Amino acid sequence: MNGITLTLRTLHRGERHLAHDLVTVAERHRTEHEVHHVATDLAVWSREHVRRLAEAAAGHDVKLGDPPDHSPDGVFATLRKKASEAVVHRPEPGLLLLRDLRELHVAAAENSLHWEMLAQAAQASRDSGLLELASSCHPQTLRQMRWTNTMIKNLSPQLLNSL
Amino acid sequence: MEDATDRIAQPWGGRVPYGRHETWPARVDTFLADGVEPEAVQRWVQSASILHSDGDAMDIAVTDGRMVGVRGRDVDRVNRGRLGPKDLFGWQANASRDRLTRPLVRRDGRLVETDWDTAMDVVAARSRELLDRRGPGSIGFYTSGQLFLEEYYTLAVLARAGIGTNHLDGNTRLCTATAAEALKETFGCDGQPGSYDDFDHADVIALFGHNIAETQPVQWMRLLDRMEGADPPRLLCVDPRPTRVAQHAAVHLAPRGGTNVALLNALLHETIRHDRIDRDFVDAHTVGFEELAERVADCTPKWAADICDVPAARIEEAAELVGTTDALVSTVLQGVYQSHQATAAAVQINNLHLIRGMLGRPGAGLLQMNGQPTAQNTRECGANGDLPGFRNWQNDTHVADLAKVWNVEPETIPHFAPPTHAMQMYRYAEQGSIRMLWISGTNPAVSLPELSRIRSILTQERLFTVVQDLFLTETAQLADVVLPAATWGEKTGALTNADRTVHLSEKAVEPPGEARPDLDIFLDYARRMDFRDKDGGPLITWDDPESAFEAWKRCSAGRPCDYTGLSYAKLRDTSGIQWPCDEESPEGTARLYTDGIDWAHPDLCESYGKDLETGASQEVVEYRSLNPDGKAVLKAAAYRPPHEEPDEEYPFQLTTGRTIYQFHTRTKTGRAPQLDAAAPDVWVEISTADADRLGLGEGDLVDVTSRRGALRGRLRPTGIRPGLLFVPFHYGYWDTDDGSGPGPDTPGRAANEATITDWDPASKQPLFKTATAALTLVERGDGRPSPAPTTTASAPATAGVARPTAGGPAAHTAQTPAEFPHGREEGAQ
């Protein structure tokens, strides 16, 4: 295994995780409607990244898995949804929301760095296919980060001052 | 010779054909109360309509201290004497016997009458207690699109600098937030680029999700008159319903709900593929063309046809229509703004105009419309989730400038995050971090999505709600304090319509009982709260409408919406004037961006823009590198599928909208006899194909059910696109047995029982047009047709199933031809 396939593997795992976490956060914060809907949309990007990474890896004779199901672990998702609806009138989930957004941000930042590494390696090895992959996916990862950053910025003043 | 027309049966009155580039001839519409002769009218008082966003100029007839009728103002550039049905008949609601005349406070669970001192003391005491114990973030204000400029401005000052809260928004969030956001994204700043006068010069008029016949009836009269004259315009209509616009259109596209971005990207694709582009304009005035071209490269009509479910050939025809004309006017409204990817879609219409160079000259213009009459004022004054005067909350110089106008420290004005939008305010209230909500001139218990949720928020014990309105609305019934407000005709103030035309509306009669102008209520509150500036003087230094207007002028100085050249005296003198109006342009400004893009420079712009798909804010550094010279930004967007798609359980898409005869939640129009009789109750529109398939017909009683709730109405098969149900959003519960919501004797009646809580991430406008629903038969019709009007988009597909909508003698209205006295081609040069 060379460095490029290692990076592909790491990134594949990172995007899989992010796709899963975005869906989980969307379910957990169903009553935060914007978070719910946008996180669900953003998970689609990561799932697409996973698919394209697997495709690229196959070209390097490395087998990586498919993206996770759209709604993972059904019973837990239902529980999370019910839990979020049960505490709809409570302020405390606000803290949990900020923590979840922070985790998403960090996960996206990690992916972003790995996209950067992949793009650099692709350039050095003149692998135009990989470079194309990184240049088309990395901007979406950056947008995922900007979104979590904006949400944290907008929500923190109210959520942290009202406990 | 005067012509008496039944203006319920003929909502747009008679025709006065005129040719392209000619002045729209005047026609004075007059309606006087039964038995009142024109010569018996003692005074005519200058005003303009607040029942839709045309801002139709009119005079109110007064006799013996009572309103007795209205007459269009032929001197005015907006309507040239014409009035729509709501203008003609709506004023009668002012004199309804169920007007609120005394303040009410909740005691032992019931609202009881009290005096102003007691009511305002309760409000001020609760405010102070919350400020002390929980801080300014615990207080929120939710206002209207129907107050006057002076009132919004005063509210903005007291909320932002007095209380110091970030939570102030208008119900314009439901109607016009996307218009503002789309203009900010493209031009860096809010403000309508075009003018209604562009309709006189246009060759092609494209109406995107805009049923202008029912939302801006007077401008539809203008289009009808042009279509009967020489060199008539051709229309492109994008609407899933068989509107009057669709019937007159050269090309009508009825796309699936939630697919506007796909359709628009295909139109852009075709425009670029055929090189129907003004390269010089693009090079001189825009950035981002390459990215846009790349994004739409694969968006062929064939691709869009599959997504939108319209024939690819029709998309090609539409693209040719808008792509080959030399004078294109586009208008945009709720079919775009309240649908999935609202801002992304509205911005693509801006893009179409930019790449075609269709901007800033007669007949080449863009109207991102407003649904609410004074929405523009809410936006200008910063009562809508922006800072006053289109200032940028992310720009410290702008905040410092505003602080100087108000003589406060900049940190007094919250600007650490964008002003909170309405939907987030309700979420904070649900969560318990907002503990007081002051609602003025609007009715969220009917107008917001997912009403069971809204009712549960408003009825929380811990939330203190103040409602300021004319009647005991559904929302007022849930309030802790109800303040009786004076309204249009009972108070003086300025209002600005969708094309930046400022009108003065003067007090004609006394308000009933102890009802007070909204301005007086806000000023009273400010006095009781003793808000101070940084030198210890009073924060609010004005005490009546005119001094408030003068204060606003100082705040608007040097900003795009500059009012400094206006005054009450000048507005009395000349009727409507378009801002900016200052020393350089004392007669006002017909069009923005006649000579390049003025307000997109990084130092001047109102917003650095957002990610259209996620809503993430851009920072100044990014904006500066993207757009260092302040050009218009061509912002591309990819199509994303809607968040809720039909399935087996909920097989229909559900959309909501309005009828020409009612306004908002019917608070006033439901109390005007002719209007109420024309559209008295909720109905459900279905395509004839779906009705036949399900064995349903006209007048059948059905339940429309979604994951959120249900409503019940009588069915009307029409030419609406298959798979879609339409329900008008006006109907609530104040005239039912249960008062503020569904109950044992009242099935759901409001469209918003069924709509989804979801909003556009960029504009934060709720999406009322993207829910899915199921339809079930409750009982067969008894031969009575559904209460839907037959004169409009709800006309039955089969003629004769319902008696034609008519008002009879009670709706007879005079139409008098008149010379347009100023004889100007343009409202302002």
Image: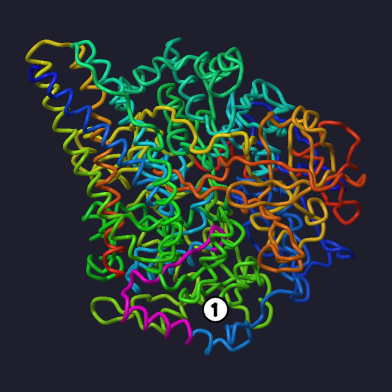
Q: Nearer the viewer, residue B801 or B58?
A: B801
Q: Nearer the viewer, residue A153 or B170?
A: A153
Q: Residue B43 location, x and y as percent?
A: 73, 68
Q: Which residues are magenta?
A: B121-147
Work out which quarter of the rendered image holds the N terminus of chain B and state it.
Answer: top right
Write down the chain letter for disc 1: B
Question: What's the residue at 55%, 34% (across, down)?
Answer: B645
Question: What's the residue at 72%, 49% (across, down)?
Answer: B83
Instruction: Give the residue at mark 1.
Output: B480
Q: Residue B375 location, x and y as percent?
A: 52, 53
Question: What's the residue at 38%, 76% (across, down)?
Answer: B541
Q: How many marks?
A: 1
Q: Label the magenta part by its dominant secondary structure.
A: helix
Q: How is the image coloured?
A: rainbow
Q: Residue furthest front?
A: A75
Quadrant of residue B212 in the image?
top right
Q: Nearer the viewer, residue B360 or B298?
A: B298
Q: Is residue B62 visible?
A: yes
Q: Assign a secondary structure to mark 1.
A: loop
- Please indicate whether residue B230 sits to the left or right of residue B697 in the image: left
Q: Mark 1 belongs to which amino acid?
A: Asp
Q: Residue B690 location, x and y as percent?
A: 74, 30
Q: Residue B280 location, x and y as percent?
A: 34, 19
Q: Is residue B581 visible?
A: no
Q: Please determine whether, in this image, residue B407 is positioned above or below residue B777.
A: below
Q: Nearer the viewer, residue B34 or A102?
A: A102
Does the magenta run of residues contain B561? no
Does the magenta run of residues contain B141? yes
Q: Check disc 1: other Cα within 10 Å, few if <14, some if 14-19, many if 20+.
A: many
- Please indicate whether residue B481 sits to the left or right of residue A139 in the image: right
- Please indicate whether residue B580 sits to the left or right of residue B107 in the image: left
